[in-house]
Image (cartoon, rainbow, N blue to C red):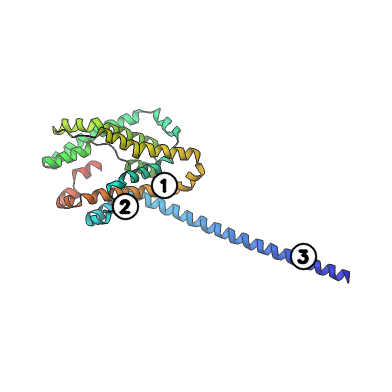
Amino acid sequence: MYILQTRHKNNVAMITMILAQAMSSTALDTSDAETTFGSKLFATYIRAASIATTLFPLWTVLFTGMALKSPSSFAWFTTEYFTAALAALMLSMGITLKPEDFAKVAKRPNSVFIQFALCYAMMPLLALFLGKACGLDSALLAGVVLVGSINGGQASNLCTYIAKGNVALSVLMTTATTLGAIFMTPLLCKTLLGAIVPVDAVGIAMSTIQVVLAPIAVGMFLNKNFPKVVKAILPFAPVVGVVSTCLLVASAVAQVAEPIRNAGMSLQVSSPTAILYL
């Protein structure tokens, strides 16, 4: 009798152990399946985001067309949101940078000087030439020259990031030309057009700090002190940058949609400004 009871207990224990192992194996298989599905889903997002950000110029053109056709669609995105959107754009770039990146660029300052010279020498003269070659009237000629006499924009930093270029160099170039606009834009307009264009020096300086330097500094701080957080959000940074830029472009175009439409296709399609930036 004792032997039978012992065998019964052993059988129960063995069955219990087998069931526990089966349940554990099932749980692991389920966990692995969930992990595999999550990994595949994230990999799909990465591929889609890469394609979408590469097509950034296309989205910009589409948003511009939408803004021209239906300006009211972007009425909600007023200039009050511009600083925040630009800051979000630059923050998405800042988290990819380290102080060492700027240190490397500082060792080769010639690149920044050359870009500054091209921005404020070649571009204004080319704008003047194209404007006169296309027979623009004085008002439009002044506008084209003014566009050619201003600094580089934050979108160039995004394009550099998408192209896997030197983002630190691009940021320094943007900062240099933005601050240079304080004195170079009025000087060029006076020299080429004989007109004085007032520039808010304090406003430009403050704007540079708010939408370029501060977000970049915050981004580098996060990259250095919270690398795990940055690693988690980094795949979403290009998308944030593209969306911010498209909204900024669309809102700006929507605010002047009527004058652009009234100018006719000759100015919109074969504009010297478009040729200048191509």
Q: Earlier in the sequence, mark 2 or mark 3?
A: 3
Q: Earlier in the sequence, mark 3 or mark 1?
A: 3
Kindly identify the amino acid type of the residue bearing the numbered disc 2: Trp
Instruction: State the residue in front, 23 or 132.
Output: 23
Which residue matches tag 1?
Answer: 237
Compared with 16, 221 (above or below) is above
Which residue matches tag 3?
Answer: 13
Q: Badges 2 and 1: C-beta atoms under 8 Å apart?
A: no
Foreground label between 2 and 1: 1
Query: SS of the residue at dot 2?
Result: helix
Q: Residue 68's mark? A: none
Q: Is residue 242 visible?
A: yes
Which residue matches tag 2?
Answer: 59
Kindly identify the amino acid type of the residue bearing the numbered disc 3: Ala
Query: SS of the residue at dot 1?
Result: helix
Locate residue 232, reporting x and y percent. 48, 48
Compared with 218, 30 (above or below) is below
Q: CA distance from mark 2 to mark 1?
A: 17 Å
- Give the position of the N terminus as an image quadrant: bottom right
Tell me: 228 left or right of 81.
right
Instruction: State the residue in front, 141 or 206.
Output: 206
